[in-house]
Image (cartoon, rainbow, N blue to C red):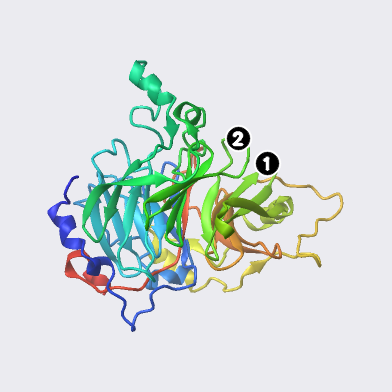
Amino acid sequence: MAMLTRAARLLLPASSLLAAARPRWRMYTSKVHGIFINYVDHERPHLFARPTSSRTVDAMLDFLPDDDRLRFWWSVLDHSGGLLLCDMGTGELCVCNPATRRWTLIPRPQRQREGARGVYLTFDPAVSPHYELIVVTAAPPGLEKPPFVDDDTSRRLLESEWPPTPWRLDVFSSRTGQWEERAFFRQGEPAGTVRGLLLHQADPTCWGCQRYGVFCRGALYVHCRGSFVLRLSLSNGTYQVISAPTYNESTRYIKPYLGRSQNMVYFGIVEVPERLRIWILDESSGRMEWILKYHDDLVPLAQHLMKYDRYDRPMDAPWMVHDVFDAEVDASAKTLTKKRFEWDSDDDGFFAIKRGAKVFHKHFDILGFHPYKEVVYLTDVFGMVAYHLNNSKVQYLGNSRPRSYYHAHTNNIDESFVYTPCLLGELNEENTDESSS
């Protein structure tokens, strides 16, 4: 496998991003700091958070290397344990810690031909100071997308099982500083054949964003093409295929979200018209079963949100997007009210709609789950709310549209990652923004 560049090797030891556990550091905070968001046809991600948050976290990630401004059109690929995985748009990946301003560059594996899709980050600061990157291939090489070569080899491959066993995946370890090919053996049945896999759409939405993955209790879960969730056990080199919850995948505007809350795996969607459905994965007694935990009507939310959020005139709110106009943001933060906007509701916790009132329809997407509370973050393109699942109360957080985001009919959100900082580690000259120390 390819060795790292000299610059990347200098940054790779565990102490460059994290250090062995030290009592004076809080390893991991339970508070949600904000949400990192990738936007459709936009050159960079942004942090949507409280205005004052930039004092503790580099919201713009300005500490990352720019290679004399060669970096262009980059994005966040994953988040795990307070670390971000970024596609730098220069043929390199970057793992960074926004709270401590440390980073390390990692070249893509040789077998990853186009882009950085399908790369996932696994890290748990309570268990180890080391992280791993895992490339989960969406289809056999050469069959990712048509046209396919029509020969005997391809025809045999189309009728073969998917995923195969053993499944050889590229894995990068910060412990060794190298990519390696690692074999994972299947437990249970496959998802089907390669031919059946290719009948499913390649991307989860019409925008073509990456499918979500989540690292939970030592296993990586990935929502894969073919309507299944992969459970990859890193400790024993095995994997399982879990059928995903059933929904209408042909509706390209439904954006499924696989995430984690209260140390459990969650799967959520918002169906038309405005029906929120959330499942939890029951792994008790060795079984893998999705249990529908919430099935809520969001039409009342749509009606009330129309009063608080306008595409052209968003109201003041607790959260805002950090952008290139940070000087203006910091100045305006002093005048922002600290009040959280909660919706009026009836005794059952649902919004009261006057009889005969006009019903507004909005399409909502899930931006993530709160890692420790029964809260899901929802957006109607840019207006963001925190929806409390156990009582249906809602808090309006603000408008997540960056000021530098040009107006076009394609404006929308691609991927989003709920960010919880990790404050573990030491500063090194090689990979730290000295001005921020």
Classify 228 as above or below 176: above
Q: Is residue 6 left or right of residue 147?
A: left
Q: Name the spot of residue 58 as percent of width and height, x first.
A: 35, 66
Callout 2, which amino acid? Thr
From the image, which quarter does the N terminus lie in? Answer: top left
**186 over 235 or under it: above or below:** above
Q: Position of residue 173 (x, y in %)?
A: 27, 56
Residue 288 vs 165, above or below: the answer is below
Residue 313, percent across and down?
A: 58, 54
Label pair 1/2, CB-CB below 8 angstroms: yes
Determine the residue positioned at 52% across, 51% down. 258
Q: Residue at x 40, y 34 (%)?
A: 139
Percent x, y of residue 280: 60, 56
Which quadrant is home to the C terminus?
bottom left
Q: Amino acid at mark 1?
A: Val
Q: Which residue is mark 1?
A: 272
Relative horizontal placement of residue 127, taking residue 339 as reference (left or right): left
> In the rendering, which numbered label is found on residue 251?
2
